[in-house]
Every structure is written in C-alpha cells, then in structure tokens.
C-alpha cells in the first residue's frame, strides 16, 4: 500500500513534468512513440512490460536497420537519461503491482537461464525503480557485484533499509553519479 500511495503522490506532483517531457520527447522523436516498452522479469521471474520514457529515435539506415544507439539518442533523451527522468513512468508499473519503489532492478527475460541459483534469488522480491545495487555503484560495478548486492538486499529487507536507499537514490540523482554506462556489456552468465 505504501508503494502505491507514494507512487500516486509522485505521479500527481510530477504530472506537469510528465506532460512537459511527453511533449519534448514527441518532438525530439519526430512524432514517434514517447514510451519505451520492454519485457522484464519481476517477482518469481514473472514477465511484465516495463514503461519508460523513450530516449532514442527510431532512425534507420538505407537498409532499414536501426542506427547505433549513440546516433539515435536525442538531445532531449540525453538530458532525460542524465537526470533519470526516463524512470518516472515506472511509477505506473508500481501502481499496477509489477514493481516496487525499492528492489533489484528488473532485467531482461533472456537472462533467466543464465542466472546461478544464488543470483536467481533476486526474484524473491518485487523489482524496484531503485535498489541497493543502484546506490552502491549502479553502472560502475560488475554484474557479479550487482547480483551480490541484490541478494544481500533480499536477505536484509527492511523498512529502514528502503528509506536509506530512497535517500541515497535522491543524492545520486542530484549528483548524477554512475548513471550512464559508456561500455555497457549485457549479462552473459557466470564465467
């Protein structure tokens, strides 16, 4: 109930920003969709559709293939990512019950068969908009470290820890630390 209540309050407070971003993204993406939808894994590895603001255009080359990410990210998209505003629509995922405000970040369903038994434990709780791994390195740490932090969170779940994560997330967003991953590598399983 607290997740839903806080998410509703957040959406109400952020509604003017939400509308402004929708308009800016629509213009930057030349009329294309303003939302990025993707299948992710939730609690007990159930699949749901995550909702984010779209930060890249759908521009394609002469053969119809999408251009590389660095050529498709718009100036608006860059700003939205840098400020983590692309995450705002996930408050709708929280209201729907797919996510929590705090928890391990929901990852792609293709990663499910790659997890070790211990790593899979991250699915014992709902995924979150932010989590312990995000405030302890986010994109600057390895997959192994992220999963260790996710499982630590599952084992130490408490209201006090969630409040600490919310506070640290606020600081990270304002300080803009570890937000982008210039050399992002997809998860390929344990070595």
Image (cartoon, rainbow, N blue to C red):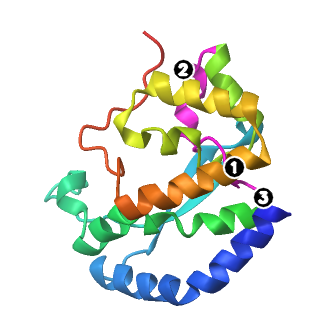
N-terminal of the pair, mark 1 or mark 2, is 2
**Which residue sits at x=36%, y=51%?**
179
- Badge nearest the viewer, 1 or 2: 1
Check residue 162 in the rendering and tell me which mark sits there, or answer none: 1
Check residue 114 in the rendering and tell me which mark sits there, or answer none: 2
**Which residue sits at x=61%, y=22%?**
119
**Which residue sits at x=60%, y=63%?**
90
N-terminal of the pair, mark 1 or mark 3, is 3
Query: In terms of image quadrants, where is residue 148?
Result: top right
- Badge nearest the viewer, 1 or 3: 1
> In the rendered view of the protein, which quadrant contains the N terminus?
bottom right
Q: Is residue 42 above or below residue 85?
A: above
**Which residue sits at x=78%, y=67%?**
4
Q: Is residue 137 above or below residue 88?
A: above
Judged left or right of residue 70, residue 112 is right
Give the spatial CA distance, label 2 vs label 3. 26 Å
Name the spot of residue 95 as percent of width and height, x first. Answer: 75, 67
Check residue 28 in the rendering and tell me which mark sits there, or answer none: none
Q: Secondary structure at mark 2?
A: helix
Judged left or right of residue 25, residue 111 is right
Note whether residue 93 is visible.
yes
Query: In terms of image quadrants, where is residue 46?
Result: top right
Q: Secondary structure at mark 3?
A: loop
Magenta part of the chain: 97-116
The residue pinned by badge 3 equals 97
Name the spot of residue 188 as percent of width and height, x first. Answer: 43, 22
Closer to the camera in the image, 168 or 36: 168
Note whether residue 37 is visible.
no
């Amino acid at each position: 109930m607290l997740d839903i209540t806080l998410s509703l309050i957040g959406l109400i407070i952020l509604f003017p920003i939400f509308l402004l971003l929708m308009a800016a993204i629509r213009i930057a993406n030349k009329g294309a969709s303003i939302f990025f939808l993707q299948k992710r894994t939730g609690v007990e590895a159930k699949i749901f559709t995550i909702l984010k603001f779209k930060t890249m255009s759908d521009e394609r080359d002469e053969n119809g293939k999408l251009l590389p990410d660095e050529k498709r990210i718009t100036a608006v998209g860059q700003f939205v990512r840098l400020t983590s505003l692309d995450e705002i629509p996930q408050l709708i995922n929280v209201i729907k019950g797919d996510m929590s405000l705090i928890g391990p970040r929901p990852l792609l369903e293709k990663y499910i068969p790659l997890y070790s038994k211990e790593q899979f434990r991250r699915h014992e709780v709902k995924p979150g908009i932010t989590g312990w791994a995000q405030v302890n390195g986010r994109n600057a740490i390895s997959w192994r470290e992220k999963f260790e932090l996710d499982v630590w969170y599952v084992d130490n779940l408490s209201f006090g820890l969630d409040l600490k994560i919310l506070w640290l997330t606020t600081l990270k967003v304002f300080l803009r630390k570890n937000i982008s991953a210039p050399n992002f590598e997809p998860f390929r399983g344990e070595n």
